[in-house]
Image (spheres, grey):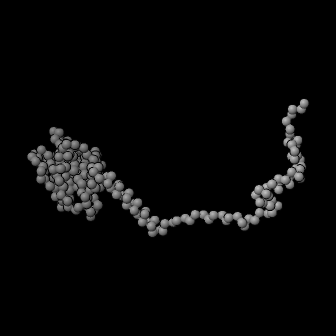
Amino acid sequence: MNTQPQQPDDLPGIGPEIDPALDARIEDSIRRTFGADLNRPIDLSALPAEAPPPPTFRFPRAVMGISAMAAVLLLSMTVFIATRGTGSPPAPTIVPGQPVNAARFYTAAMTDFEPEIVCDTPEKFADYTDEAFDLALAADFDAGVELIGWIGLGAYDKASGKSRRRGLLARSQSGERVIAFFAPADVEVNLDGLGDVNTHRWTIGDLTVTEVSNLPAPILQSVITTP
């Protein structure tokens, strides 16, 4: 007995050629079920048209500009609020003729005694003073006085764009700390609140020098001169 499964060519109506009678029965069954004529061409005009794309909405340019400005303003306010109370020092005040608070700088210098600018040769000293004061000054580094360096004194002159006011830290041969305030002659060096210290004042060019220390006599007057 042959138990081999039937191959496709052995099935009824399936083979190299389809049985016309079977094909007619299938077409007749489809026509009765769906009411469609398989031989009639499809009318594509009856199909629904392709749906149009959804409309796009664009903001007017004026609205976009206002939105950008609002974003920038919000960012600026955020930065301002975030930086309030951080203790950052204010920018130097640009006030011509603003007095120098000698007591404030003297107290800070005697406590810290660290310069911002160090000029350890006569050439550096002359170059720095020429830049700071528009007046090159000569310093005698062999006089036995230690010139520690310079500190700034805050305010700027609006006319020149420079401060033209500096404090020079020095140490005497005995180790006494000294600060000398250099400022234009029309700038007041306010000595209020200094306490029990000695002050000595003289001029170099158009600068007034006010030396403050516990020493009975100035130590810088003969050390710093004009060339």
User: Residue 58's spot in the image, x, y percent?
Assistant: 51, 66
Q: Residue at x 24, y 54 (%)?
A: 154
User: Residue 115's spot in the image, x, y percent?
Assistant: 25, 46
The residue lying furthest to the top in this view is: 1
Quarter occupied by residue 113: top left
Quarter occupied by residue 55: bottom right
Horizontal side of 144 relative to 29 (left or right) equals left
Horizontal side of 88 relative to 21 (left or right) equals left
Horizontal side of 46 relative to 7 (left or right) equals left
Look at the image and tell me in which quarter the N terminus lies. top right
Above or below: residue 3 compared with residue 8: above
Q: Residue at x 9, y 46 (%)?
A: 196
Q: Residue at x 12, y 44 (%)?
A: 214
Q: Residue at x 67, y 65 (%)?
A: 49
| Front residue of this view, candidates 180 and 17 | 17
Please give the count of numbered marks on the rendered protein. Answer: 0
Residue 211 in sight here: no
Horizontal side of 225 relative to 193 (left or right) equals right
Residue 63 in sight here: yes
Above or below: residue 144 compared with residue 88: above
User: Residue 97's spot in the image, x, y percent?
Assistant: 20, 61
| Front residue of this view, candidates 188 and 82 | 82
The residue lying furthest to the front in this view is: 32
User: Residue 64's spot in the image, x, y percent?
Assistant: 46, 65
| Front residue of this view, candidates 13 and 82 | 13
Quarter occupied by residue 63: bottom left
Look at the image and tell me in which quarter the C terminus lies. bottom left
Above or below: residue 210 compared with residue 4: below
